[in-house]
Amino acid sequence: MVLAQLGGSISRALAQMSNATVIDEKVLNDCLNEISRALLQADVQFKMVRDMQTNIKRIVNLEALAAGTNKRRIMQQAVFTELCNMLDPGKPSFTPKKGKPSVVMFVGLQGSGKTTTCTKYAYCHQRKGFKPALVCADTFRAGAFDQLKQNATKAKIPFYGSYMESDPVKIAVEGVERFKKENCDLIIVDTSGRHKQEAALFEEMRQVSEATKPDLVIFVMDSSIGQAAFDQAQAFKQSASVGAVIITKMDGHAKGGGALSAVAATKSPVIFIGTGEHIDEFEVFDVKPFVSRLLGMGDWSGFMDKIHEVVPTDQQPELLQKLSEGSFTLRLMYEQFQNILKMGPIGQVFSMLPGFSAELMPKGHEKESQAKIKRYMTMMDSMTDAELDSTNPKLMTESRIIRIARGSGRPVRDVMDMLEEYKRLAKIWGKMKGLKIPKKGEMSALSRNMNVQHMSKVLPPQMLKQIGGMGGLQSLMKQMGSKEMSGMFGGMGGDR
Ligand SMILES: Nc1nc2c(ncn2[C@@H]2O[C@H](COP(=O)(O)OP(=O)(O)OP(=O)(O)O)[C@@H](O)[C@H]2O)c(=O)[nH]1
Protein backbone atom coordinates (compact mmCIF):
# COMPACT_ATOMS: atom_id res chain seq x y z
CA MET A 1 0.00 0.00 0.00
CA VAL A 2 1.30 3.41 -0.92
CA LEU A 3 0.60 4.64 2.58
CA ALA A 4 3.17 2.16 3.85
CA GLN A 5 5.75 4.00 1.77
CA LEU A 6 4.64 7.24 3.39
CA GLY A 7 5.07 5.67 6.82
CA GLY A 8 8.47 4.32 5.77
CA SER A 9 9.66 7.76 4.65
CA ILE A 10 8.51 9.42 7.87
CA SER A 11 10.10 6.72 10.03
CA ARG A 12 13.35 7.09 8.09
CA ALA A 13 13.35 10.86 8.58
CA LEU A 14 12.82 10.40 12.33
CA ALA A 15 15.50 7.72 12.52
CA GLN A 16 17.97 9.92 10.69
CA MET A 17 17.29 12.70 13.15
CA SER A 18 17.76 10.29 16.03
CA ASN A 19 21.17 9.33 14.74
CA ALA A 20 22.43 12.91 14.87
CA THR A 21 24.67 13.61 17.85
CA VAL A 22 23.25 17.06 18.46
CA ILE A 23 19.78 18.13 17.44
CA ASP A 24 20.02 21.69 16.25
CA GLU A 25 17.87 23.87 14.01
CA LYS A 26 19.36 22.36 10.85
CA VAL A 27 18.75 18.76 11.88
CA LEU A 28 15.20 19.63 12.87
CA ASN A 29 14.54 21.45 9.59
CA ASP A 30 15.98 18.61 7.51
CA CYS A 31 13.77 16.14 9.31
CA LEU A 32 10.67 18.31 8.92
CA ASN A 33 11.38 18.88 5.23
CA GLU A 34 11.73 15.16 4.69
CA ILE A 35 8.42 14.48 6.44
CA SER A 36 6.69 17.26 4.51
CA ARG A 37 8.01 15.91 1.21
CA ALA A 38 6.64 12.45 2.05
CA LEU A 39 3.23 13.88 2.94
CA LEU A 40 3.07 15.98 -0.24
CA GLN A 41 3.98 12.91 -2.28
CA ALA A 42 1.03 11.13 -0.66
CA ASP A 43 -1.09 14.02 -1.97
CA VAL A 44 -1.82 15.63 1.38
CA GLN A 45 -2.94 19.23 0.92
CA PHE A 46 -0.13 21.77 0.91
CA LYS A 47 -1.76 23.96 3.55
CA MET A 48 -2.18 21.01 5.92
CA VAL A 49 1.46 20.06 5.50
CA ARG A 50 2.59 23.63 6.09
CA ASP A 51 0.39 23.94 9.20
CA MET A 52 1.73 20.69 10.50
CA GLN A 53 5.27 21.88 9.98
CA THR A 54 4.55 25.14 11.82
CA ASN A 55 2.86 23.33 14.71
CA ILE A 56 5.72 20.90 15.12
CA LYS A 57 8.23 23.73 15.06
CA ARG A 58 6.26 25.51 17.73
CA ILE A 59 6.11 22.42 19.94
CA VAL A 60 9.75 21.59 19.35
CA ASN A 61 11.03 25.10 19.84
CA LEU A 62 14.67 24.19 20.28
CA GLU A 63 15.67 27.46 21.83
CA ALA A 64 12.85 27.55 24.32
CA LEU A 65 13.39 23.98 25.46
CA ALA A 66 15.25 23.63 28.73
CA ALA A 67 18.67 22.07 28.57
CA GLY A 68 18.54 18.35 29.16
CA THR A 69 15.04 17.97 27.72
CA ASN A 70 14.79 15.05 25.38
CA LYS A 71 14.34 16.78 22.04
CA ARG A 72 14.07 13.58 20.07
CA ARG A 73 11.23 12.33 22.18
CA ILE A 74 9.40 15.63 21.92
CA MET A 75 9.88 15.64 18.15
CA GLN A 76 8.60 12.11 17.77
CA GLN A 77 5.61 12.77 19.95
CA ALA A 78 4.86 15.96 18.03
CA VAL A 79 4.85 14.12 14.68
CA PHE A 80 2.58 11.43 16.08
CA THR A 81 0.19 13.98 17.61
CA GLU A 82 0.10 16.18 14.52
CA LEU A 83 -0.62 13.24 12.21
CA CYS A 84 -3.39 12.15 14.56
CA ASN A 85 -4.82 15.66 14.68
CA MET A 86 -4.77 15.85 10.91
CA LEU A 87 -6.78 12.66 10.55
CA ASP A 88 -9.08 12.91 13.53
CA PRO A 89 -12.40 14.69 12.90
CA GLY A 90 -12.96 14.57 16.63
CA LYS A 91 -16.37 12.96 16.74
CA PRO A 92 -17.32 9.30 16.64
CA SER A 93 -20.03 7.98 14.35
CA PHE A 94 -23.04 5.85 15.17
CA THR A 95 -22.09 2.23 15.86
CA PRO A 96 -24.63 -0.55 15.47
CA LYS A 97 -25.37 -2.69 18.53
CA LYS A 98 -25.84 -6.43 18.42
CA GLY A 99 -29.45 -7.54 18.95
CA LYS A 100 -30.86 -4.06 18.31
CA PRO A 101 -32.10 -3.51 14.74
CA SER A 102 -30.15 -0.82 12.89
CA VAL A 103 -30.59 0.37 9.33
CA VAL A 104 -27.46 1.55 7.55
CA MET A 105 -27.76 3.16 4.13
CA PHE A 106 -24.84 3.28 1.68
CA VAL A 107 -24.47 6.15 -0.78
CA GLY A 108 -21.78 7.14 -3.29
CA LEU A 109 -20.94 7.68 -6.92
CA GLN A 110 -20.97 4.87 -9.46
CA GLY A 111 -17.88 2.72 -9.37
CA SER A 112 -16.74 4.00 -5.99
CA GLY A 113 -16.93 0.45 -4.67
CA LYS A 114 -20.27 0.87 -2.89
CA THR A 115 -21.73 -2.57 -3.60
CA THR A 116 -18.48 -4.35 -2.77
CA THR A 117 -18.16 -2.30 0.42
CA CYS A 118 -21.75 -3.10 1.55
CA THR A 119 -20.86 -6.78 1.54
CA LYS A 120 -17.50 -6.20 3.23
CA TYR A 121 -19.27 -4.19 5.94
CA ALA A 122 -21.92 -6.89 6.38
CA TYR A 123 -19.32 -9.66 6.45
CA CYS A 124 -17.13 -7.87 8.95
CA HIS A 125 -20.10 -7.46 11.32
CA GLN A 126 -21.25 -11.02 10.73
CA ARG A 127 -17.87 -12.20 11.99
CA LYS A 128 -18.40 -10.17 15.12
CA GLY A 129 -21.70 -11.96 15.80
CA PHE A 130 -24.16 -9.60 14.14
CA LYS A 131 -27.05 -10.87 12.01
CA PRO A 132 -26.67 -8.65 8.92
CA ALA A 133 -28.84 -8.51 5.78
CA LEU A 134 -28.40 -6.73 2.44
CA VAL A 135 -31.04 -4.83 0.48
CA CYS A 136 -30.32 -3.83 -3.12
CA ALA A 137 -32.14 -0.55 -3.75
CA ASP A 138 -29.95 0.21 -6.76
CA THR A 139 -32.37 0.05 -9.66
CA PHE A 140 -30.29 2.40 -11.79
CA ARG A 141 -27.38 0.18 -12.75
CA ALA A 142 -28.31 -2.99 -14.57
CA GLY A 143 -26.45 -5.82 -12.91
CA ALA A 144 -26.26 -4.19 -9.46
CA PHE A 145 -28.71 -6.70 -7.98
CA ASP A 146 -26.83 -9.66 -9.48
CA GLN A 147 -23.57 -8.34 -8.09
CA LEU A 148 -24.96 -7.89 -4.59
CA LYS A 149 -26.73 -11.26 -4.76
CA GLN A 150 -23.52 -12.97 -5.80
CA ASN A 151 -21.46 -11.30 -3.07
CA ALA A 152 -24.12 -11.95 -0.43
CA THR A 153 -24.50 -15.61 -1.39
CA LYS A 154 -20.75 -16.14 -1.18
CA ALA A 155 -20.67 -14.62 2.30
CA LYS A 156 -23.89 -16.42 3.33
CA ILE A 157 -25.69 -13.16 4.08
CA PRO A 158 -29.46 -12.87 3.40
CA PHE A 159 -30.33 -10.38 0.67
CA TYR A 160 -33.36 -8.75 -0.88
CA GLY A 161 -33.88 -7.15 -4.29
CA SER A 162 -35.89 -7.36 -7.47
CA TYR A 163 -35.27 -7.60 -11.20
CA MET A 164 -38.73 -6.26 -12.02
CA GLU A 165 -39.34 -3.42 -9.59
CA SER A 166 -37.93 -0.09 -10.72
CA ASP A 167 -38.84 1.98 -7.64
CA PRO A 168 -35.85 2.01 -5.27
CA VAL A 169 -37.93 3.38 -2.41
CA LYS A 170 -40.39 0.49 -2.62
CA ILE A 171 -37.62 -2.12 -2.64
CA ALA A 172 -35.79 -0.45 0.23
CA VAL A 173 -38.92 -0.32 2.40
CA GLU A 174 -39.91 -3.92 1.61
CA GLY A 175 -36.40 -5.19 2.30
CA VAL A 176 -36.02 -3.33 5.59
CA GLU A 177 -39.46 -4.53 6.77
CA ARG A 178 -38.77 -8.12 5.85
CA PHE A 179 -35.41 -8.24 7.62
CA LYS A 180 -36.75 -6.48 10.70
CA LYS A 181 -39.35 -9.26 10.92
CA GLU A 182 -36.56 -11.81 10.55
CA ASN A 183 -34.78 -10.24 13.54
CA CYS A 184 -31.74 -9.08 11.59
CA ASP A 185 -29.88 -6.52 13.65
CA LEU A 186 -27.95 -4.84 10.83
CA ILE A 187 -29.95 -4.05 7.70
CA ILE A 188 -27.76 -2.58 4.99
CA VAL A 189 -29.36 -0.71 2.11
CA ASP A 190 -27.29 -0.30 -1.06
CA THR A 191 -28.51 2.64 -3.14
CA SER A 192 -27.89 3.70 -6.75
CA GLY A 193 -24.84 5.61 -7.80
CA ARG A 194 -24.44 8.09 -10.66
CA HIS A 195 -21.44 9.04 -12.70
CA LYS A 196 -21.31 12.41 -11.06
CA GLN A 197 -23.01 14.37 -8.32
CA GLU A 198 -26.36 15.29 -9.79
CA ALA A 199 -29.76 16.37 -8.57
CA ALA A 200 -31.48 13.07 -9.52
CA LEU A 201 -29.07 11.10 -7.36
CA PHE A 202 -29.49 13.34 -4.35
CA GLU A 203 -33.27 13.32 -4.74
CA GLU A 204 -33.36 9.52 -4.85
CA MET A 205 -31.10 9.31 -1.81
CA ARG A 206 -33.36 11.70 0.06
CA GLN A 207 -36.45 9.63 -0.75
CA VAL A 208 -34.90 6.30 0.24
CA SER A 209 -33.60 7.87 3.40
CA GLU A 210 -36.97 9.36 4.29
CA ALA A 211 -38.72 6.04 3.74
CA THR A 212 -36.26 3.79 5.60
CA LYS A 213 -35.14 6.20 8.34
CA PRO A 214 -31.58 4.90 8.52
CA ASP A 215 -29.65 5.09 11.78
CA LEU A 216 -26.53 5.81 9.77
CA VAL A 217 -25.80 6.94 6.21
CA ILE A 218 -22.36 5.85 5.01
CA PHE A 219 -20.75 7.63 2.10
CA VAL A 220 -18.41 5.41 0.07
CA MET A 221 -15.65 7.14 -1.82
CA ASP A 222 -12.85 6.05 -4.13
CA SER A 223 -9.48 7.22 -2.74
CA SER A 224 -8.07 7.85 -6.22
CA ILE A 225 -9.69 11.29 -6.33
CA GLY A 226 -7.24 12.46 -3.66
CA GLN A 227 -7.80 15.98 -2.39
CA ALA A 228 -11.01 16.36 -4.42
CA ALA A 229 -12.43 14.14 -1.70
CA PHE A 230 -13.04 17.26 0.36
CA ASP A 231 -15.65 18.69 -2.04
CA GLN A 232 -17.29 15.35 -2.71
CA ALA A 233 -17.56 14.38 0.95
CA GLN A 234 -18.87 17.86 1.78
CA ALA A 235 -21.55 17.69 -0.97
CA PHE A 236 -22.79 14.28 0.13
CA LYS A 237 -22.70 15.30 3.77
CA GLN A 238 -25.00 18.21 3.07
CA SER A 239 -27.42 16.32 0.83
CA ALA A 240 -27.78 13.03 2.61
CA SER A 241 -26.85 13.75 6.22
CA VAL A 242 -23.86 11.45 5.91
CA GLY A 243 -22.75 10.18 9.32
CA ALA A 244 -19.62 8.26 8.32
CA VAL A 245 -17.31 7.69 5.37
CA ILE A 246 -15.61 4.59 3.99
CA ILE A 247 -12.67 5.21 1.65
CA THR A 248 -12.06 2.43 -0.85
CA LYS A 249 -9.11 1.33 -2.99
CA MET A 250 -6.53 2.48 -0.49
CA ASP A 251 -4.37 -0.33 -1.84
CA GLY A 252 -3.96 1.39 -5.16
CA HIS A 253 -2.31 4.73 -5.52
CA ALA A 254 -0.44 7.65 -4.14
CA LYS A 255 -3.56 9.70 -3.50
CA GLY A 256 -4.73 7.72 -0.46
CA GLY A 257 -3.15 10.12 2.01
CA GLY A 258 -4.82 13.03 0.25
CA ALA A 259 -8.28 11.47 0.33
CA LEU A 260 -7.95 10.46 3.94
CA SER A 261 -6.82 13.85 5.18
CA ALA A 262 -9.32 15.69 2.97
CA VAL A 263 -12.26 13.70 4.29
CA ALA A 264 -11.08 14.18 7.85
CA ALA A 265 -11.01 17.92 7.14
CA THR A 266 -14.78 17.83 6.43
CA LYS A 267 -15.14 16.57 10.04
CA SER A 268 -16.74 13.33 8.84
CA PRO A 269 -15.48 10.27 10.65
CA VAL A 270 -13.79 7.73 8.38
CA ILE A 271 -14.80 4.38 9.86
CA PHE A 272 -13.28 1.82 7.49
CA ILE A 273 -10.89 1.71 4.56
CA GLY A 274 -11.04 -0.73 1.67
CA THR A 275 -7.66 -2.25 0.88
CA GLY A 276 -8.47 -4.66 -1.95
CA GLU A 277 -11.18 -6.36 -3.93
CA HIS A 278 -11.44 -9.35 -1.64
CA ILE A 279 -14.21 -9.43 0.97
CA ASP A 280 -11.89 -9.23 3.96
CA GLU A 281 -9.60 -6.58 2.55
CA PHE A 282 -11.32 -4.11 4.78
CA GLU A 283 -9.93 -2.44 7.86
CA VAL A 284 -11.40 -0.54 10.74
CA PHE A 285 -10.10 2.99 10.58
CA ASP A 286 -9.09 4.21 13.99
CA VAL A 287 -6.77 7.20 13.98
CA LYS A 288 -4.20 6.36 16.68
CA PRO A 289 -3.55 2.71 15.79
CA PHE A 290 -3.54 3.73 12.11
CA VAL A 291 -0.86 6.39 12.62
CA SER A 292 1.01 4.01 14.88
CA ARG A 293 1.08 1.46 12.08
CA LEU A 294 1.86 4.08 9.49
CA LEU A 295 4.97 4.98 11.43
CA GLY A 296 5.93 1.31 11.56
CA MET A 297 5.12 1.02 15.24
CA GLY A 298 2.69 -1.86 14.75
CA ASP A 299 -0.88 -1.95 15.95
CA TRP A 300 -1.10 -4.10 18.99
CA SER A 301 -4.84 -3.77 19.51
CA GLY A 302 -5.51 -4.62 15.86
CA PHE A 303 -3.26 -7.62 16.16
CA MET A 304 -5.03 -8.83 19.28
CA ASP A 305 -8.36 -8.47 17.48
CA LYS A 306 -6.97 -10.52 14.62
CA ILE A 307 -5.84 -13.21 17.04
CA HIS A 308 -9.37 -13.36 18.40
CA GLU A 309 -10.75 -13.44 14.87
CA VAL A 310 -8.31 -15.91 13.36
CA VAL A 311 -7.16 -18.29 16.05
CA PRO A 312 -9.88 -20.86 16.81
CA THR A 313 -11.50 -20.09 20.17
CA ASP A 314 -10.33 -23.32 21.76
CA GLN A 315 -6.70 -22.53 20.85
CA GLN A 316 -6.75 -18.94 22.09
CA PRO A 317 -6.19 -19.43 25.84
CA GLU A 318 -3.32 -21.83 25.16
CA LEU A 319 -1.66 -19.50 22.67
CA LEU A 320 -2.00 -16.46 24.90
CA GLN A 321 -0.80 -18.44 27.91
CA LYS A 322 2.29 -19.63 26.02
CA LEU A 323 3.02 -16.14 24.75
CA SER A 324 2.73 -14.68 28.22
CA GLU A 325 5.13 -17.36 29.49
CA GLY A 326 7.55 -16.31 26.80
CA SER A 327 7.79 -19.81 25.34
CA PHE A 328 7.52 -19.30 21.63
CA THR A 329 8.34 -22.67 20.07
CA LEU A 330 8.60 -23.74 16.46
CA ARG A 331 5.35 -25.65 16.96
CA LEU A 332 3.64 -22.45 18.03
CA MET A 333 5.01 -20.73 14.95
CA TYR A 334 3.72 -23.64 12.80
CA GLU A 335 0.25 -23.38 14.31
CA GLN A 336 0.20 -19.62 13.76
CA PHE A 337 1.26 -20.08 10.15
CA GLN A 338 -1.64 -22.51 9.73
CA ASN A 339 -4.03 -19.92 11.15
CA ILE A 340 -2.58 -17.14 9.05
CA LEU A 341 -2.89 -19.17 5.85
CA LYS A 342 -6.53 -19.85 6.68
CA MET A 343 -7.36 -16.19 7.03
CA GLY A 344 -6.54 -14.84 3.60
CA PRO A 345 -4.59 -11.65 3.04
CA ILE A 346 -1.58 -12.08 5.23
CA GLY A 347 -0.19 -8.62 4.63
CA GLN A 348 -2.92 -7.26 6.87
CA VAL A 349 -1.92 -9.43 9.80
CA PHE A 350 1.77 -8.91 9.38
CA SER A 351 1.47 -5.17 9.24
CA MET A 352 -0.18 -5.34 12.66
CA LEU A 353 2.49 -7.55 14.10
CA PRO A 354 5.24 -5.61 15.81
CA GLY A 355 8.37 -5.90 13.73
CA PHE A 356 6.67 -6.46 10.40
CA SER A 357 5.62 -3.31 8.64
CA ALA A 358 3.46 -3.38 5.54
CA GLU A 359 6.58 -2.24 3.76
CA LEU A 360 8.35 -5.48 4.63
CA MET A 361 5.36 -7.52 3.54
CA PRO A 362 4.27 -5.39 0.63
CA LYS A 363 0.97 -5.77 -1.07
CA GLY A 364 1.39 -7.47 -4.36
CA HIS A 365 3.95 -9.81 -2.80
CA GLU A 366 1.39 -11.74 -0.83
CA LYS A 367 1.65 -14.77 -3.05
CA GLU A 368 5.40 -14.93 -2.42
CA SER A 369 4.94 -14.45 1.32
CA GLN A 370 2.29 -17.15 1.33
CA ALA A 371 4.53 -19.52 -0.64
CA LYS A 372 7.34 -18.84 1.81
CA ILE A 373 5.16 -19.71 4.76
CA LYS A 374 4.09 -22.93 3.06
CA ARG A 375 7.76 -23.75 2.42
CA TYR A 376 8.58 -23.17 6.08
CA MET A 377 5.75 -25.45 7.07
CA THR A 378 6.95 -28.24 4.76
CA MET A 379 10.34 -28.05 6.43
CA MET A 380 8.79 -28.08 9.88
CA ASP A 381 6.87 -31.21 8.86
CA SER A 382 10.25 -32.94 8.77
CA MET A 383 11.07 -31.97 12.35
CA THR A 384 10.76 -34.18 15.40
CA ASP A 385 8.41 -33.35 18.27
CA ALA A 386 11.40 -32.51 20.45
CA GLU A 387 12.60 -29.98 17.89
CA LEU A 388 9.19 -28.43 17.48
CA ASP A 389 8.60 -28.08 21.21
CA SER A 390 12.01 -26.81 22.19
CA THR A 391 12.75 -23.21 23.06
CA ASN A 392 16.48 -23.87 22.97
CA PRO A 393 17.98 -22.63 19.68
CA LYS A 394 21.15 -24.63 20.35
CA LEU A 395 19.22 -27.85 19.79
CA MET A 396 19.23 -27.19 16.05
CA THR A 397 22.66 -28.64 15.29
CA GLU A 398 24.17 -28.91 11.85
CA SER A 399 23.24 -32.59 11.54
CA ARG A 400 19.63 -31.87 12.44
CA ILE A 401 19.49 -29.05 9.90
CA ILE A 402 20.89 -31.32 7.17
CA ARG A 403 18.38 -34.03 8.11
CA ILE A 404 15.44 -31.57 7.90
CA ALA A 405 16.67 -30.25 4.55
CA ARG A 406 16.91 -33.78 3.16
CA GLY A 407 13.56 -34.82 4.60
CA SER A 408 11.75 -31.87 3.08
CA GLY A 409 13.67 -31.78 -0.18
CA ARG A 410 14.81 -28.20 0.43
CA PRO A 411 18.31 -26.72 0.38
CA VAL A 412 20.03 -26.27 3.74
CA ARG A 413 19.92 -22.51 3.23
CA ASP A 414 16.13 -22.60 3.29
CA VAL A 415 16.13 -24.39 6.64
CA MET A 416 18.56 -21.81 7.99
CA ASP A 417 16.29 -19.06 6.68
CA MET A 418 13.31 -20.58 8.40
CA LEU A 419 15.20 -20.87 11.68
CA GLU A 420 16.32 -17.25 11.37
CA GLU A 421 12.70 -16.24 10.90
CA TYR A 422 11.77 -18.27 13.97
CA LYS A 423 14.48 -16.57 16.01
CA ARG A 424 13.29 -13.18 14.88
CA LEU A 425 9.69 -13.92 15.77
CA ALA A 426 10.66 -15.59 19.05
CA LYS A 427 12.63 -12.49 19.99
CA ILE A 428 9.73 -10.17 19.29
CA TRP A 429 7.05 -12.35 20.79
CA GLY A 430 9.29 -13.31 23.69
CA LYS A 431 9.01 -9.72 24.86
CA MET A 432 5.42 -10.38 25.73
CA LYS A 433 6.54 -12.55 28.61
CA GLY A 434 4.75 -11.56 31.76
CA LEU A 435 2.37 -9.18 30.04
CA LYS A 436 -1.21 -9.75 31.02
CA ILE A 437 -3.07 -10.60 27.84
CA PRO A 438 -6.51 -9.04 27.72
CA LYS A 439 -9.59 -11.05 26.92
CA LYS A 440 -11.71 -10.18 23.91
CA GLY A 441 -13.19 -6.70 24.25
CA GLU A 442 -10.86 -5.86 27.10
CA MET A 443 -8.22 -3.88 25.27
CA SER A 444 -8.13 -1.16 27.88
CA ALA A 445 -7.00 -3.80 30.37
CA LEU A 446 -3.79 -4.06 28.38
CA SER A 447 -3.08 -0.39 28.87
CA ARG A 448 -3.92 -0.57 32.56
CA ASN A 449 -1.52 -3.42 32.96
CA MET A 450 1.30 -1.82 31.08
CA ASN A 451 3.48 -0.29 33.71
CA VAL A 452 6.71 1.50 33.01
CA GLN A 453 8.74 -1.62 33.74
CA HIS A 454 6.87 -3.60 31.14
CA MET A 455 6.96 -0.85 28.59
CA SER A 456 10.71 -0.55 29.00
CA LYS A 457 11.06 -4.27 28.26
CA VAL A 458 8.71 -4.18 25.33
CA LEU A 459 10.28 -1.17 23.61
CA PRO A 460 13.31 -1.78 21.42
CA PRO A 461 16.42 -0.37 23.16
CA GLN A 462 16.94 2.16 20.36
CA MET A 463 13.44 3.51 20.86
CA LEU A 464 13.82 3.60 24.63
CA LYS A 465 17.00 5.59 24.19
CA GLN A 466 15.21 8.05 21.93
CA ILE A 467 12.48 8.53 24.50
CA GLY A 468 15.09 9.37 27.10
CA GLY A 469 15.53 6.09 28.94
CA MET A 470 13.44 5.03 31.91
CA GLY A 471 13.09 8.59 33.17
CA GLY A 472 11.82 9.82 29.84
CA LEU A 473 9.42 6.91 29.55
CA GLN A 474 8.08 7.53 33.03
CA SER A 475 7.34 11.18 32.40
CA LEU A 476 5.97 10.42 28.94
CA MET A 477 3.52 7.91 30.38
CA LYS A 478 2.49 10.34 33.05
CA GLN A 479 2.04 13.08 30.48
CA MET A 480 -0.03 11.04 28.09
CA GLY A 481 -1.82 8.72 30.46
CA SER A 482 -1.20 5.02 30.07
CA LYS A 483 -4.31 4.60 27.89
CA GLU A 484 -2.85 6.80 25.19
CA MET A 485 0.42 4.97 25.44
CA SER A 486 -1.12 1.74 24.31
CA GLY A 487 -2.29 3.45 21.14
CA MET A 488 0.99 5.12 20.46
CA PHE A 489 3.47 2.53 21.57
CA GLY A 490 1.17 -0.45 21.65
CA GLY A 491 3.03 -2.27 18.97
CA MET A 492 6.56 -1.11 19.19
CA GLY A 493 7.84 -4.31 20.67
CA GLY A 494 9.69 -5.31 17.55
CA ASP A 495 13.32 -4.92 16.67
CA ARG A 496 13.42 -3.11 13.43
N1 LIG B 1 -8.47 -2.53 -5.40
C1 LIG B 1 -9.66 -2.33 -4.85
N2 LIG B 1 -10.77 -2.45 -5.60
C2 LIG B 1 -11.96 -2.24 -5.03
C3 LIG B 1 -12.09 -1.88 -3.66
N3 LIG B 1 -13.42 -1.72 -3.39
C4 LIG B 1 -14.07 -1.98 -4.55
N4 LIG B 1 -13.22 -2.28 -5.53
C5 LIG B 1 -13.50 -2.59 -6.96
O1 LIG B 1 -14.07 -1.44 -7.57
C6 LIG B 1 -14.95 -1.81 -8.59
C7 LIG B 1 -16.29 -1.09 -8.44
O2 LIG B 1 -16.93 -1.58 -7.30
P1 LIG B 1 -18.52 -1.71 -7.17
O3 LIG B 1 -18.77 -2.24 -5.81
O4 LIG B 1 -19.08 -2.44 -8.31
O5 LIG B 1 -18.91 -0.19 -7.31
P2 LIG B 1 -20.28 0.56 -6.99
O6 LIG B 1 -19.89 1.86 -6.39
O7 LIG B 1 -21.20 -0.30 -6.23
O8 LIG B 1 -20.88 0.85 -8.37
P3 LIG B 1 -22.42 1.26 -8.62
O9 LIG B 1 -23.25 0.14 -8.08
O10 LIG B 1 -22.47 1.33 -10.09
O11 LIG B 1 -22.66 2.53 -7.98
C8 LIG B 1 -15.07 -3.32 -8.53
O12 LIG B 1 -14.23 -3.88 -9.51
C9 LIG B 1 -14.54 -3.66 -7.14
O13 LIG B 1 -13.97 -4.94 -7.08
C10 LIG B 1 -10.89 -1.73 -2.87
O14 LIG B 1 -10.87 -1.40 -1.68
N5 LIG B 1 -9.71 -1.97 -3.53
Image: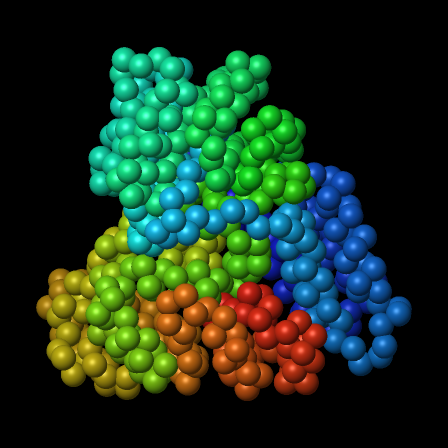
The image shows residue 83, relative to residue 108, as above or below, that is: below
Residue 56: name its quadrant: bottom right
Q: Residue at x 81, y 52 (%)?
A: 54
Position of residue 326 measured from the top left corner of the image (x, y, whole percent): 35, 83
**Is residue 87 visible to us here?**
yes
Q: Nearer the viewer, residue 177 or 391?
A: 177
- From the top left corner, tell me how far across and down residue 337 is, in percent: 26, 63
Task: Report the side of 432 relative to 317 (left or right).
Answer: right
Q: Residue at 73% x, 44% y: name it.
A: 48
The residue closer to the viewer here, 391 or 271, is: 271
Q: Is residue 376 left or right of residue 193?
A: left
**Residue 413 seen from this side:** no
* Figure disc tally: 0
Q: Is 373 drawn above or below residue 486 in the view shown?
A: above
At horizontal 25% and vertical 56% (from top left) the residue drawn is 341
Tell me the colour scheme of the image.
rainbow
Q: Residue at x 29, y 32 (%)?
A: 178
Viewer-proximal residue among 198 and 366: 198
Foreground residue among 419 and 280: 280
Q: Residue 18 in the image: x percent, y percent?
A: 68, 69
Toward the left, the furthest residue is 407
459 relative position to 32: left or right: left
State whether residue 45 is above or below residue 140: below
Residue ranking furthest to the right: 63
Q: Position of residue 427 (x, y in %)?
A: 40, 77
